[in-house]
Structure formats: C-alpha cells, structure tokens
Image (tube, coloured by chain):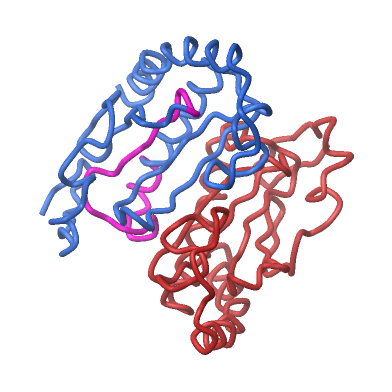
Chain colours: A blue, B red
Amino acid sequence: MSSGESGVRYAAAPEAAACVFCAEDGGDVLWRDARLRVIAARGEPDYPGLCRVIWNAHVTEFSDLSAVDREHLMRAVVVVERALRATLNPNKINIASLGNMIAHQHWHIIPRFSDDAHFPRPVWAAAQREPCASRHTARVAAAAGVGAAVRDALQREFG
Amino acid sequence: MSSGESGVRYAAAPEAAACVFCAEDGGDVLWRDARLRVIAARGEPDYPGLCRVIWNAHVTEFSDLSAVDREHLMRAVVVVERALRATLNPNKINIASLGNMIAHQHWHIIPRFSDDAHFPRPVWAAAQREPCASRHTARVAAAAGVGAAVRDALQREFG
C-alpha cells in the first residue's frame, strides 16, 4: 500500500510485484512528489525531449484515479507540454497513456516535428524517413534544456 | 470565432478553414455540448467501441485550452473510458491526443484486448495477428451498447 498527498490509499495490484515502474524510476527523474514523477526518457534517440509522467502507485487505468488525483496528473502533463513547447518549439505535441506493456499509469509527452522520423504518423508507426542529421543534432542540443525547464515549471506549478 | 460555455472565445486558427473536424462531426455523435462532442468512430473495424472526444473549436494543443476547459475535456474522457470499461470489459484502455494529421484537439479512447490485432503494441504499429473471428464478432455485438452507455454516462455527468 502507498499513500498519496490526497490521502487516498492505493492497494498494490498483484502485478505490481513484476512492474518495472514499481521497481525503477523509468528514466531520469526531473520532478517527484508524493503522487507522481516526471522523467526524461532514456533510449528514445529519435525523440529528444520526450518526457513521461508516471504515477507513483501501481494504478492501471486513468479512471481508477480519483478526480483530485486525475487533476493533479493532468496539471503535470500540461506543465510538461508547455515546457516542451517553450524549449523546443515543436510542430505538434503528442500525448498518450497506453500501458499495454506496462500497465502502470503513465503518460508520454512527445514533441513532434514535421520532418521527424515518423511524422505525421504516431511514433509507434512505421518510420517515414531518416531525419535530417543537422536539424536532429540541433534538437538534441535544444533538448538539453528540457530538464531545467520542466523542473522549474513544475516547481512554479506545485511549489 | 466560437464561444464556449466557459465564456472563453477561441480565435479560429488559419488552418481551421481546411480542417475536417471544423467541417464535419468526425463520426456518429453520441454527445455534444457547447465545448465538445463525443463521437463513435467510423472506419475502425479492428476496434469496435473506439470513441473520440473532439473539441468543438479549432484549438490545436491541450495546453492552448484554459484550465476550466481542460478539466471539462478530461471529465468527458474519463466518463467515456468508464463507459467503455463497463460495456466491453477490455484488458486495457488507450488514451491519446496526437493531432499530427488533424491539428484540432481530439482524444482517442480505445478499448484494447490482449488478442486484438495490435496488442500489446499501439494500434498505429504493425499488426501482430489476425484477431480470432468469433471473439471479434462478440465484441462488435457488445460494442452496439457503447453509444447508449456513453450518452447515459455523459448525461449523468454533465446533466
């Protein structure tokens, strides 16, 4: 069992024992509070700046969370989205909560560019092209600022 | 310009003139209020019950919406998710707001089954298998109840 700021107690689901997001942070932690953490993804070379908001407790579906917790989660998602937009100026932001492989509530916030590997298809679809190396390099450089931008923005939001 | 219940006025983006979600409902409308509509998708034979929540005004990013409007949108998303869970008992719900092709704020709520065409991959990835015909047929039949379930649940939520 774990207890969030909201006072809600979450029963650990049986699958939690084998859950990677219960065992590990799941990336470089940019922010953490009692209920959630925001991580910079590792192993996503095509998508510099890709962040994930991961609920700390092993909750599977968005609708398993209380209204108060859903609001807290979506506040984090929107703060991350804004920090990515300000830092990288992407053509589009993609937001997704899938969880088919890791059934532990988490949200992908993905900055997309019209010339990235998969655009305009989702990042999980077949690649459309080899991205332009110089533009990609510039984005990797800009994404070095994402961690501080996300941390600062979440600090301002949640204090 | 259009005006939502919240009193916020949205400037129509230049691209709105060519936007399919400005020109058309985008599916069979299950619910509509001043700010959003919920549609049953057409042309998704692999995913009976797939619903979309579409913002009525041409707003591109989630973070372009006010906090009040984001809350209204996510209340609709969670109500649809719960109605899909109750009607279809899926193994997982996938939620996504991508908008790379139609840059008009909309959310996919997709019931997933461990033996569906793409599981555990996202529905946009390469297919993993031909779904079992009899199970798929049973889901198509069950999905006939999604429209009423979504409508009733949104009516209870928003009155």
Q: Nearer the viewer, residue A102 or A31?
A: A102
Q: Nearer the viewer, residue A143 or B158?
A: A143
The residue at 54%/41% (across/down) is A123
- Identify the residue at the far left of this view: A1
Q: Nearer the viewer, residue B28 or A107?
A: A107
The residue at 47%/35% (across/down) is A109
The residue at 45%/24% (across/down) is A49
In the picture shown, does residue B77 fall above or below A79?
A: below
Q: Quadrant of residue A115?
A: top right
Q: Is residue B93 rendered to the left or right of residue A60?
A: right
The residue at 18%/39% (across/down) is A24
Q: How many marks?
A: 0
Magenta stretch encompasses residue A70: yes
Q: Could you tell me which quadrant the N terminus of chain A lies in? A: bottom left
Image location of residue B151, percent across then percent down = 61, 73
- Identify the residue at the far front of this view: A130
Image location of residue B157, percent across then percent down = 52, 65
Q: Is residue A63 rendered to the left or right of residue B57?
A: left
Image location of residue B28, percent across then percent down = 74, 69
Magenta stretch encompasses residue B149: no
In the picture shown, does residue A149 fall above or below B98?
A: above
Image location of residue B112, percent across then percent down = 46, 67
Q: Which segment is the magenta one?
A: A46-72
Q: Could you tell me which quadrant the C terminus of chain A lies in? A: top left
